Image (spheres, rainbow, N blue to C red):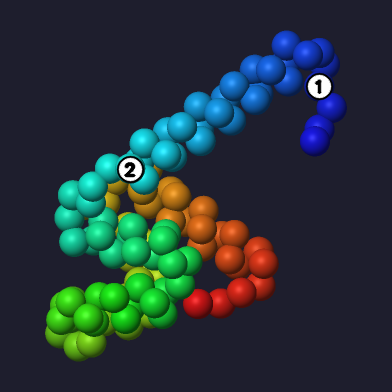
Amino acid sequence: MKSYENIAELIENLELEIKAINDEITTLKAEPQSFNEQVIFKYIETGSTGKTKDFVRSLGVKSERGSLFSSGDVSKLIKAGSEDISAELLAIARKVANMKNKNGKQR
């Protein structure tokens, strides 16, 4: 934990963290509004592009290329986003991906 000028500054920062966490909870409680959001929710749930790919394949959905959905398609959706994915949900997915990358884990 970093040092603060005073207790009020620490309290303010902690309150901001609480608000950010509550905002994430609200986002995660919402129902997916599109298929792409459903894919992103599954990625957040599993933390795995491979498991998310398997989920999409189980639904019989193919990629934009017309071939089987791949882990790379999941990664691309997280990185590039899509008009039908809320910015808040995408930010959470990217946070999950960054945590995984920092821990040296793949898929």
Q: Amino acid at mark 1?
A: Tyr
- Residue positioned 43% across, 40% down in the render: 24
Up/down of 67 relative to 1, above or below: below
Mark-to-mark CA distance, 1 and 2: 34 Å
Q: Going from the N terminus, do you reach mark 1 or mark 2 first?
A: 1
- Residue positioned 17% across, 55% down in the render: 34
Up/down of 29 relative to 74, above or below: above
The residue wearing badge 1 is 4
107 vs 79, nearest the viewer: 107
12 vs 18, nearest the viewer: 18
Residue 79 at least partly seen: no
Up/down of 46 relative to 82, above or below: below
Residue 43 at least partly seen: yes
The residue wearing badge 2 is 29
Up/down of 30 relative to 39, above or below: above
Classify residue 8 as left or right of residue 67: right
The image shows residue 14 at horizontal and vertical percentages of: 65, 25
Quadrant the N terminus occupies: top right
Classify residue 69 as left or right of residue 100: left
4 vs 23, nearest the viewer: 23
The image shows residue 16 at horizontal and vertical percentages of: 57, 25
Helix or strand or loop: what does disc 1 sit on?
A: loop
- Residue positioned 38% across, 52% down in the render: 90
